[in-house]
Amino acid sequence: MSIVHSDELGQFQHENATPHASRVATKWLQEHSSDFRHFHWPPKSPENIIEDIRDALLHAVEIISPPPRFPMDLWTVLKDEGCELPPRYLQTLVESMPHCVATLLCVRGGPTRY
């Protein structure tokens, strides 16, 4: 966070998916909680732009031939493909957040219909 948001305005969005709620991840987040702001998100929420971005990156990696064979190759591909995501696509995801949050508030953090 200090590298990406040197202005200290960044927030870590934690979706609370099962792997992210493991003892190891939870302990790390507790130990580093003073290092960044932490935006809590309902567990397994469908209103999660991080998953939309992840899906776009996964699709980009799946169509690369030959596929990356080593972790550093995958990291390079993900960084390159992340930079190629259309700004309008990212803006649309960001603009969808107020509606998503309002919907979650209406259902008090429960499941939604989309």
Image (cartoon, rainbow, N blue to C red):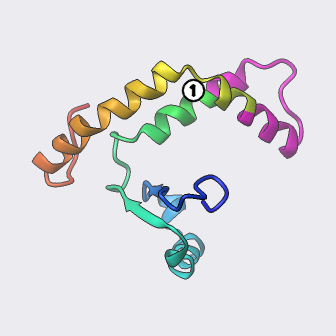
Amino acid type at mark 1 = Ala
Q: Does 26 sit above or below residue 75? A: below
Q: Quadrant of the C terminus?
A: top left
Work out whether 2 lies above or below 84: below
By secondary structure, the bulk of the magenta-drawn segment is best described as helix
Indicate the position of residue 57 as horizontal and vertical percent values: 63, 30
Q: Quick one: 9 or 39, which is closer to the camera? A: 9
Q: Position of residue 2 (x, y in %)?
A: 63, 62
Inspect the magenta stretch and tell me whether residue 74 lies in it.
yes
* Residue 84: percent from left, percent from top: 66, 22
Identify which residue is drawn at 78% across, 20% down.
Answer: 64
The residue where tag 1 is placed is 56
Q: Residue furthest front?
A: 7
Label count reads 1
Q: Quadrant of residue 16?
A: bottom left
Instruction: Please give the name of the residue rendered at 39% of the width and 41% of the height, measured from the top-left corner.
Output: 48
The magenta-colored residue range is 58-79
Badge 1: few (under 14), some or many (20 or more) residues near its Cα, within 10 Å?
A: some
Q: Compared to 86, does 100 lie above or below?
A: below
Where the N terminus falls, by quadrant?
bottom right
Front residue of this view, candidates 73 and 67: 73
